[in-house]
Image (cartoon, rainbow, N blue to C red):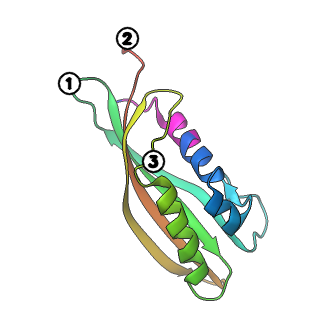
Amino acid sequence: MSYGTALALQQAIYQRLTANATLTVLVGAAIFDAVPPGVTTGTYVALGSEDVREAGDATGQGALHEVTISVVSDASGFATAKEVAVAVSDALEHAPLILARGHLISLTFHRARARRVQDADMRRIDLKFRARVQDSQPTE
């Protein structure tokens, strides 16, 4: 197994989202690797949790990353959050990301969960993507 491509994958996903014209129209610069402290209003996109498991094969080290991208909105109803979630999905599904280390074999949508955030008038959609990566660093 290799976790060596995790940072490169995160950086490439963030770059892809921040460079996407549709997302820029919908949320402006509100695409975060880490949500700023304090109360965040409006609609934003945030990189979230990641689960990784070994996925090497005869050709080398690899890993399967399950990455969460969250869309959070204080807009009434789910329409705004879903519009942004669709744009995130369109931007990432099968995206030809270039990694600083290793290479992406596949990036696919896996599932989503839409819900109201308790004790707040917020909507949240957590999109899960599966990224299969192969590490380019030789083992020692």
**Which of the two residues, 52 or 82, is positioned nearer the viewer here?**
82
Instruction: Give the extent of the magenta segment.
Output: 2-11
Q: Nearer the viewer, mark 3 or mark 1?
A: 3
* Residue type highlighted by circle 3: Ala
Q: Residue at x 61, y 44 (%)?
A: 15
Residue annotated with mark 2: 140
Q: Quadrant of residue 7?
A: top right
* Main SS category, magenta section: helix
User: Which label's residue is closer to the chain start, 3 or 1?
Assistant: 1
Q: Quadrant of residue 121?
A: bottom right
Q: Residue at x 65, y 51 (%)?
A: 18
Residue annotated with mark 1: 58
* Residue type highlighted by circle 1: Ala
What's the distance in space between the residues labelled 3 and 2, CA to CA? 31 Å
Q: Quadrant of the C terminus?
A: top left
**Depicted 52 relative to depicted 124: above or below:** above
